[in-house]
Amino acid sequence: MLKQLISQIQNRKNLRLQKSFKKEVCRKSIHLSALWIPALIYFSHPGFAIMVFSVLFVGNTILEYGNYKRFRWARRTFGLIFYRLLRKKETRRNTFQVSGSMYVLMAAIACTLMFSKPVAVIALTVMLISDTCAALFGKAFGTRKLYRQKSLEGTAAFFMSALFINMCYEPMYHFTYAGVIACLAATFAEMFEDKIEIDDNLSIPVVIGIVLTLLG
């Protein structure tokens, strides 16, 4: 009986982990779909890119605030698009909590305004891909905790993928020690998101952009 009980508990735990991982894969697939953002920055005029990002930002703000105020049209639309992909902190109803997409658009606007095209593209690409690698590797293989819910495996995946991305942009932007420092700084920004109190979708690209601009 005891063995059967232990087996049932373990099976339930495994099912929860599988559901959690599937949800994370779904969320991060949406995250990766935003790779059109660095592409638009690189291939278009900065003014046009900022206009597109600003329109989407305003539209997203209206939708999310309408959902918070429980307007029927907003709740239906928001639920259809986002609800199953949101984390708990983004579904609280007692306060207005914006989703990660708002921070991605803020980061796109900030990077386009503040940095050169190559730096903005690298910064946003790292945020989109490396954050995905950290989340998925952490969920699948993370066993050694570094800080709160951050694992050694997920953090290593973030740093290594960020380095690889910087190297891949070598023809566009020369990879030097600045790239290593930028990746390291971004890794800490992702790990200590709660300490700096800035969503990592915004802090990661801004940190990378500042480091590459000052040291590159």
Image (spheres, helix red, strand yellow):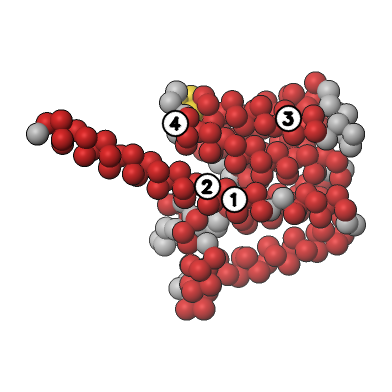
Circles 3 and 2: CB atoms closer than 8 Å: no
Mark 1 lies on residue: 29
**Residue drawn at x 87%, y 59% as measured from the top left:** 47
Q: What is the quadrant of residue 189 in the picture?
A: top right
**Residue drawn at x 47%, y 36% as measured from the top left:** 139
Distance of mark 3 from mark 1, alpha carbons? 20 Å
SS at mark 3?
helix
- Where in the figure is residue 140, as x and y percent of width and height? 47, 34
Q: Toward the viewer: 27 or 187?
A: 27
Q: How many marks?
A: 4
Three-letter code, disc 1: Ser
Instruction: Point out the image quarter for the N terminus.
Output: top left
**Residue drawn at x 66%, y 41% as measured from the top left:** 129
SS at mark 1?
helix
Mark 2 lies on residue: 25
- Where in the figure is residue 81, as x and y percent of width and height? 54, 65
Instruction: Point out the image quarter for the C terminus.
Output: top right
**Residue drawn at x 83%, y 35% as measured from the top left:** 169
Mark 3 lies on residue: 164
Label located before the other in sequence (3 or 4): 4
Q: What is the quadrant of residue 102 in the picture?
A: bottom right
Three-letter code, disc 4: Arg
Circles 1 and 2: CB atoms closer than 8 Å: yes
Mark 4 lies on residue: 148
Label located before the other in sequence (2 or 4): 2
Assess disc 3: are there few (<14), some (14-19) or many (≥20) residues with their C-alpha within 10 Å of its C-alpha.
Answer: few
Distance of mark 2 from mark 4, alpha carbons? 21 Å
